[in-house]
Amino acid sequence: MADLLGQVHSAAGDYLASLAARPVQDRDALALLAELGGPLPEKGSEPGEVIERLLRVGAAAGTASSGPRFFHFVTGGVTPAALAADWAAALFDQNAFSKISSPFAHEVETVALRWLRELFGLPESWGGALVGSATFANFTSLGCATHWWGFQLGVDTAEDGLAELPRMPVLSSGYVHASARKALQMLGHGRNSVTVCARDGVGRVDLGVMRHHLNRLKGAPSVIIANAGEVNAGDFDPIGELAELAAEFGAWLHVDGAFGLFAALSPRTAHLVEGIGRADSIAADAHKWLNVPYESGFALVRDQARLGSAFGMPGAAYLPGPGDPASGYALYGPESSRRARSLPIWATLAAYGKQGHREMVERHLDLAQHLAARVDAAPELERLADVPLSIVCFRAAPAGVADLDDFNRRLGAALLEDGRVYAGTTLYDGRIALRPAIVNWRTTEADIDLFVDVVRELSQKVSHEVGTRAS
């Protein structure tokens, strides 16, 4: 086994060193994926050969999403301390089910959750759960909201489900993410249970419309989803004003802060999440702006007991149940058998502290402004939105192009095919656009400049292709 781990260690040095300059995706190398297929081996192969093949194919054909030029989706990198701790998590192979299954994993998770609360300035009284993603963090938070809502109507939804209840009212702006809709879908409310209160095509919240819907509920309990960091341009719902509405109407306020929650780390952007401490629940990703490996998310809730009420397991003779001193975090979230995903979170916070992560966020804010300035200076590029955080939404708009949506679809496809940098397209206010997100600790100004240069180069290429076809 030591020899096999040595192979991985040896390959890691070369791979990590390559991230600064390698393409994000080498399309030619994808042909190597065939080496991993074929029928299931009857007897298997020598383990050293198997690991060598996996490392060789992965290093060539894998997407360098932990590198500095991956701007697609909102994908963080992996800090050195987080990567080493993630290897340790695999090495120790702890089941973080409970104190009895791993006192070590339980204690690290307890500290990691406390440090996350401190990182975002939340009171010590808040509880939390480490989960696999922001989708599961939304699921966990909205699961607590569901149990609270049922309790207001005299039903324990954990015991008896939703069958005898009306549809749970859920209100949000047009920024509500598919992740929150998926969470509602999995909880049995339906992905279309959200009443969208938007005042424009971008999705900005209409507080008057939301108030109208809340008045129509005549005091019935409801859930408001506030969005901290919309994925197309990084915009924010006015969390403080939504908190006022929630307090006035007795609603549960959930904040989807998958990456935008990290605005709290900088005095330059903390105003964007003003009022966050008045929420009932918050969902966020660690594998985005905290820069720990996939899969890592967290849910934070004002009342820890609600996690136990919503996610406590039914009794089993061999398992510790609620109230048992040997129980643990499996009773505070959707997963029972759980990897020790707290280790990378603990390690990156211990190694770099609040100051290091604040400096990283502020460096990304600067890089986003640099990208916006480069876009503004390019005559054939058009920025479509302000840049409050770390996403720059823009499109190519060369003179003489009649169908800019088709042009930018082609440009987005060309970017992904080219592979030197990575950013996909989105639909913003009815227009096809690029929306590169900067959340990787490795990204430098040189990477941003290369991104703009590649976009402009490929824009010229697409212009030529479109012109050739037209002629």
Image: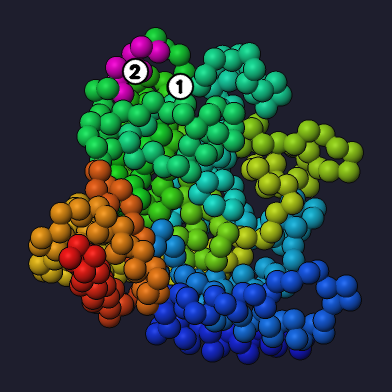
Residue sitting at 53 percent across and 84 percent down? 15
Residue 224 is drawn in which quadrant? Answer: top left
Residue sitting at 28 percent across and 31 percent down? 198
Tag 1: amino acid: Pro
The foreground one among 213 and 280 is 213
Asked if the magenta segment contains residue 277, the reply would be no
Q: Secondary structure at mark 1?
A: loop
Which residue is under mark 2? 213
Left or right of residue 424, residue 107 in this image: right
Residue 238 shows in the view: no
Residue sitting at 45 percent across and 54 percent down? 118
Predominant SS along the magenta part: helix
The foreground one among 226 and 272 is 226
User: Crowding near pointer 1: few (<14 within 10 Å), some, many (20+)?
Assistant: some
Residue 460 is drawn in which quadrant? Answer: bottom left
* Mark before the other along the chain sequence, 1 or 2: 1
* Residue 418 x, y percent position in the rendering: 37, 74
**Which label was assigned to residue 169?**
1
Residue 20 versus residue 351 in the image, above or below = below
Which quadrant, please, contains the C terminus?
bottom left
Residue 49 is drawn in which quadrant? Answer: bottom right
Which quadrant, please, contains the N terminus?
bottom right
Residue 431 shows in the view: yes
Residue 467 versus residue 128 in the image, above or below = below
Left or right of residue 124, residue 9 in this image: right
* Residue 214 x, y percent position in the rendering: 36, 18
Tag 2: amino acid: His
Left or right of residue 7, residue 290 in this image: left
Q: Are marks 1 and 2 in contact (CB under 8 Å)?
A: yes
* Residue 73 x, y percent position in the rendering: 41, 58
**Magenta residue span:** 210-217
